[in-house]
Image (cartoon, rainbow, N blue to C red):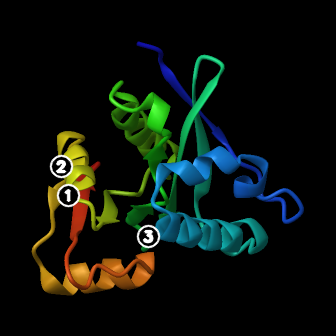
């Protein structure tokens, strides 16, 4: 298995991520890809948007995208984490999560992911995430992620440091 490497995507309003690398749209369903494009564009054009967008490579092959955004001084959320269909089932997602967490500032203690997909939720749990049950935390994370889970979904949390 190849080792994953992450490289930051630069903020450049003239060269957007999903225009430069349209294959990344195949990671999610069409409606979710549209949301990913919208949120990524916000980050690319607004210097006040926190965090990073990180391209994932295994060897010379693009395998996915991940990233993070700051929610509070000690909390972050994953930003559109995904592996391209041809690269799935190789353990890349777990490596990407670990590397994205290493990219975060040292004071980040908890990382959140919001998903409506049961398979994704299970995969994140295999990477050390746990389902959040506190309704106040769920509401806060969903609001900050701007990703609705009404009708079904999970807020997951990975503890990096206590």
Query: Which residue was labeled with disc 3?
Result: 73
Count residues near mark 2 (Cα–Cα under 10 Å), then give few for <14, some for 14-19, many for 20+: few
User: Which quadrant of the rendered structure holds the N terminus?
Assistant: top left
Count residues near mark 1 (Cα–Cα under 10 Å), then give few for <14, some for 14-19, many for 20+: few
Q: Which mark is residue 138?
A: none
Q: Viewer-nearest of labels 2 and 1? A: 1
Which residue is at the far front?
A: 30
Q: Can residue 81 be seen in this view?
A: yes
Query: Which residue was labeled with disc 1?
Result: 118
CB contact under 8 Å: marks 2 and 1: yes
Q: Viewer-nearest of labels 1 and 3? A: 1
Q: Distance between the residues labelled 2 and 1?
A: 6 Å
Residue 48, image quadrant:
bottom right
CB contact under 8 Å: marks 1 and 3: no
x, y percent for residue 51: 58, 60
Q: Can residue 162 be seen in this view?
A: no
Label 1, secondary structure: give it.
helix
x, y percent for residue 135: 15, 84
Choose the circle earlier in sequence order: 2 or 3: 3
Residue at 70% over, 56% down: 18
* Residue 83 drawn above or below residue 14: above
Q: Nearer the viewer, residue 108 or 78?
A: 78
Label 2, secondary structure: give it.
helix
Query: Which residue was labeled with disc 2?
Result: 122
């Amino acid at each position: 298995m190849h080792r994953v490497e992450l490289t930051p995507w630069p903020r450049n309003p003239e060269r957007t991520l999903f225009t430069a690398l349209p294959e990344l749209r195949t990671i999610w369903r069409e409606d979710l890809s549209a949301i990913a494009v919208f949120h990524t564009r916000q980050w690319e054009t607004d210097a006040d948007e926190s965090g990073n967008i990180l391209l994932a490579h295994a060897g010379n092959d693009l395998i996915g995208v991940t990233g993070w955004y700051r929610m509070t001084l000690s909390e972050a959320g994953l930003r559109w984490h995904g592996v391209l269909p041809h690269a799935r089932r190789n353990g890349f997602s777990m490596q990407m999560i670990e590397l994205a967490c290493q990219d975060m500032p040292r004071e980040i203690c908890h990382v959140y992911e919001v998903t409506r997909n049961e398979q994704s939720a299970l995969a994140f749990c295999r990477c050390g995430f746990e389902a959040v049950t506190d309704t106040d935390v769920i509401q806060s994370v969903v609001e900050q992620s701007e990703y609705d889970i009404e009708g079904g979904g999970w807020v997951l949390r990975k503890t990096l440091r206590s």
